[in-house]
Amino acid sequence: MRKVLKNCLVVSEDLSIEKRDLYVEGERLVDFVEGDIEDMNSMIVIPGLINTHTHAAMTLFRGVAEDVALDEWLSEYIFPRELKLTEEDVYIGSLLGFMEMVKNGITTFVDMYFFPHAVAQAAKDIGIRGIITRGLANVDGHGSEKLKECEDFIHEYASDPLIKGGVGPHALYTCSNDYFKESVEVAHSNNSLLTFHLLESPSERNNFKKRSNIEPVDFLNSIGAFDEKTIVAHGTHLNNEELKLLSQHKTTISYNPTSNAKLGNGIAPIPQALSEGVNITLGTDSAASNNSLNLFSEMKFGSLIQRACKEDPTIMKVEELFKMATYNARRPLPFDIGKIESGMLADLVVINPNKLSTLPKKHFYSHLVYSFDTTAIEKVMIGGKWIYDGDFCTVDICEVMERFEKTVDSIDSRI
Ligand code: NI
């Protein structure tokens, strides 16, 4: 399949805009090819956004519990429901989550949940790219089965163009230290992405120290958990020394500002992390703790909360935020994504700049971060295929929404 997208206003990672044609052959951008011509009429084209921390199926729990602390939220509302979930529930919850992401310009995700095959089926049905990590915990005594399922999934999807498996030990408080170490070894032996929640809430550090008599980051460092293929989700309470260590190991942090703020977990030390040279990406976390799956709002809120907190309007620059949502995710992920260049995967978001919130066009530069409304997204391409063009090209939205609502009622009746 060859496509020529004529008259695009292409946005680079430094947010400069250049008028040019784009050429797509198969799943990639190429220097030149003859093919079906589509005139983009000076629409803005940006690389697809990359959501580096999510639990897509948790759209099923959006709004289920508000105004409670993380411990209570997990133990009273989320874990009891998750125990009742079937593979089919996870499929429909993930599918709705991925649809929301695509509609908001997200073309790649890093997901942590269970029933990885159901998550993969949902991703493939809509056509979104992603890393699926089977969430690992051994507090219920089924740790080894989960780890085997995780490793089998990695092997099964090793040559899939859209989906790869990764390893997702949930957190230090849901995994024993030995189990966490085993999970890290599985990630290393399979050369896979490793991702886990770390120091998300204020109490985690002391709870771990009481249990293990060692600092959480020192323990993780001792088992080799930090390297270039590691994404630490949250890191809200990391100190400067720990940020230095992450920087030395080229480890990535997934900054989830909305989820952290909503759950009252604090504000991640992102300006400090940037000055230490840590690679920062953005994540929505789940629709139960966000409650949207929208990285444009994460860019804006992620900047504003740091500026308000530090009383400094010069930090969290527009280009830095845009790179967090795109380019920076390339380092830990096994895909050629995050920028528009020949040889990269054709994951593109086409934006109509003629919208109330994106005028004046001549200052479009900062609109992507500070005034963007995702209804300006006209089309989304993933791997050279149009997935969204005002309607979903691969799934029937009405059918999915109806099935989703029935599933939520069914889960509630099982509690
Ligand atoms: Ni999470």
Image (cartoon, helix red, strand yellow):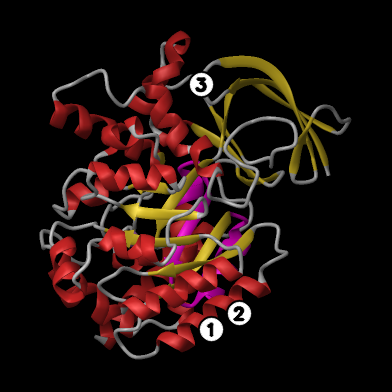
User: Which quadrant: the N terminus?
Assistant: top right
Q: Is residue 188 rendered to the left or right of residue 369? A: right
User: Which quadrant: the C terminus?
Assistant: bottom left
Structural distance between the alpha carbons of marks 2 and 1: 6 Å
Among numbered discs 1 and 3, the one appearing first in the sequence:
3
User: Residue at the spot x=75%, y=46% of the render?
Assistant: 27
Q: Residue furthest right?
A: 34
Rendered view: 75 above or below 53: below
Q: Residues within 10 Å of mark 1 (few under 14, many from 20)?
A: few
User: Residue at the spot x=73%, y=64% of the render?
Assistant: 159
Q: Is residue 288 rendered to the left or right of residue 133? A: left
- Helix or strand or loop: what does disc 1 sit on? helix
- Helix or strand or loop: what does disc 2 sit on? helix
Rendered view: 353 above or below 197: above
Residue 102, position in %: x, y? Answer: 51, 48
Q: Nearer the viewer, residue 180 or 312?
A: 180
Q: Residue furthest bottom?
A: 141
Among numbered discs 2 and 3, the one appearing first in the sequence:
3
Question: For ligand 1, which image quadrant applies?
Answer: bottom left
- Residue kind at label 3, given as amino acid type: Asp
Structural distance between the alpha carbons of marks 2 and 3: 40 Å
- Helix or strand or loop: what does disc 3 sit on? loop
**Residue holding disc 2:** 152
**Residue holding disc 1:** 148
Quarter occupied by residue 225: bottom left
Magenta stretch in the rendered image: 101-128
Structural distance between the alpha carbons of marks 1 and 3: 42 Å
Residue 36, position in %: x, y? Answer: 83, 34
Q: Residues within 10 Å of mark 2 (few under 14, many from 20)?
A: few
Residue 73, position in %: x, y? Answer: 17, 68
Rendered view: 367 above or below 87: above
